[in-house]
Amino acid sequence: TSDVNDWTRSDIYHNSFLIPPDATLDSALKLSEQNGLPPYAVSAAQAKFLYLLAKSIQAHRILEVGTLGGYSTIWFAKALPPDGEIITCEISEHYAKVAQQNIDHAGLTSRVKIVLGPAIDTLSRLHSDETFDLAFIDADKQSNVDYFIQAKRLVRNQGVIIVDNVVRSGRVADPIQSDPSVDGVRRLLQYIHNDSTVEATTMGTVGEKGYDGFLFAINKPR
Ligand code: DHB
Ligand code: MG
């Protein structure tokens, strides 16, 4: 639609001032596409926001659920100090292989650990004394609540949990709409509504990925 083109143009315009072209990131997207990965990576503008957020809290350890081709992983890894680490969960061996190539090509191998397998198994195995400063949940939306519960356990006091794709062009709020992803987001919102241990908000986004939003939550002191 013309909306999508307008908002893509808007991203291109803003990015031209704020986000320098990066051949490594471009080639990561290209390799992902060539290998048949779906175009579900966050946009450059969104990734830069996540990168700045990680820097602003001086994150040393980041947890990611859903690696895909490693695009957001690379941005997060760039926000880390040299001794920092991002652990990223991926269920698809094919996606993980492409992501590993992209991360290696970006020179970030030492800061990134891709864990292959169902994320809920990986997260359950992590000990809550290995705390993270930030978690980014961007995988199968049906499992949002399960991932969020694990992220709460694994993120430090006042640490940040971000969940991608919680607006979905407004479908989440449209009672006529129902699909597993929309329902997964609704269950997450209801879960947080009943949860006194986090504070959260939705930040709607618009740009080359259309209309969507991040859920932003902070673990209350416990
Ligand atoms: C889908 C998943 C994503 O993580 C995203 O950012 C966009 C779309 C999807 O499964 O449709
Ligand atoms: Mg996403």
Image (cartoon, rainbow, N blue to C red):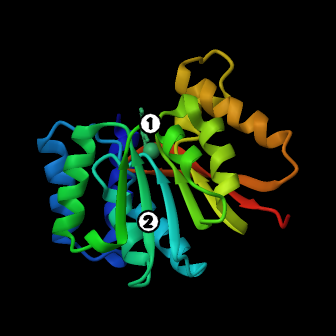
The residue shown at (42%, 48%) is 89
Residue 44: give its label.
Answer: none
Q: Give coordinates of residue 176: x percent, y percent.
A: 64, 15
The residue most toward the left is 34
Q: Which residue is mark 1?
A: 118
| 113 and 58: which is toward the camera | 113
The residue shown at (60%, 37%) is 144
Determine if the C-beta at disc 1 is less than 8 A from ligand 1.
no
| 147 and 45: which is toward the camera | 147
Q: Residues within 10 Å of mark 2 (few under 14, many from 20)?
A: many
At label 1, which amino acid type do we have? Pro
Q: CA distance from mark 1 to mark 2?
A: 17 Å
Residue 3 horizontal side relative to residue 121, left or right: left
| 111 and 212: which is toward the camera | 111
Q: Which residue is mark 2?
A: 86
Residue 41 horizontal side relative to residue 154, left or right: left
Residue 23 horizontal side relative to residue 20, left or right: left
Q: Is residue 133 above or below residue 192?
A: below
At label 2, which amino acid type do we have? Ile
